[in-house]
Image (cartoon, grey):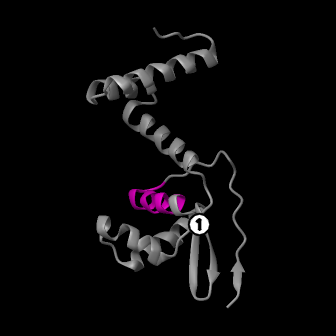
């Protein structure tokens, strides 16, 4: 039983990766494990989602058409692997969230999070440190 390799799609760095909720859940599993069969993904999502293996197989096929996963064949099984980085998908999804909910105003989103979420002192200190570092990169903003 040989291993057959398929040509991966070339995806430009500027491509936006829009994923639905189930697609993102599948990608998280593939990023964590590095690869997986339909059965592997199905078992990982079974208790959370309760979906049929055919649903997972259909979704993986759509995701391959979208250019976010690729597969190899081992025997009669497709072994799927991510071909986009988690950071790229996260960047796209957060950007779309800011655009959709806050009209592109990232400060409004940060203000919302600070108002609506309970941060402990350690988390607030980490946020202040991030802001200081970001200000140092750009040389203009300083937080005390």
Which residue: 38% across, 27% down? 123
Side (left or right) of 11 relative to 57: right
- In reply to whether residue 39 is colored magenta, the answer given is no
Farthest residue to the front: give it.
Answer: 122
What segment is highlighted magenta in the picture? 19-31
Side (left or right) of 14 relative to 47: right
The image quarter containing residue 105 is top left
Question: Dot 1 corresponds to which residue?
Answer: 81
Q: Position of residue 122 (x, y in %)?
A: 37, 25
Q: Position of residue 132 (x, y in %)?
A: 53, 16
Q: Nearer the viewer, residue 79 or 11?
A: 79
- Residue 52 appears in the rendering: yes
Mark 1 residue element: strand
Instruction: Give above or below for 37 relative to 143.
Output: below
Which residue: 28% across, 30% down? 117
- Residue 105 appears in the rendering: no
Looking at the figure, which quarter contains the N terminus?
bottom right
The image quarter containing residue 118 is top left
Looking at the figure, which quarter contains the C terminus?
top left
Which residue: 46% across, 74% down? 40
Q: Position of residue 35 (x, y in %)?
A: 56, 67
Q: Nearer the viewer, residue 96 or 24?
A: 24
Name the magenta segment's main secondary structure: helix
Q: Nearer the viewer, residue 119 or 25?
A: 119
């Amino acid at each position: 039983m040989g291993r057959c390799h398929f040509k991966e799609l070339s995806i430009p760095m500027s491509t936006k990766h829009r994923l639905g909720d189930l697609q993102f859940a599948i990608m998280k599993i593939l990023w964590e494990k590095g690869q997986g069969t339909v059965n592997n993904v199905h078992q990982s999502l079974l208790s959370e989602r309760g979906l049929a293996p055919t649903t997972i197989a259909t979704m993986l096929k759509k995701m391959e058409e979208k250019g976010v996963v690729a597969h190899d064949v081992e025997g009669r099984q497709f072994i799927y692997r991510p071909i986009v980085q988690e950071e790229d998908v996260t960047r796209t999804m957060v950007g779309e969230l800011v655009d959709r909910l806050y009209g592109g105003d990232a400060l409004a989103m940060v203000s919302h999070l600070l108002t609506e979420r309970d941060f402990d002192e350690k988390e607030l200190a980490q946020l202040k440190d991030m802001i200081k570092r970001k200000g140092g990169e750009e040389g203009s903003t300083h937080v005390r």
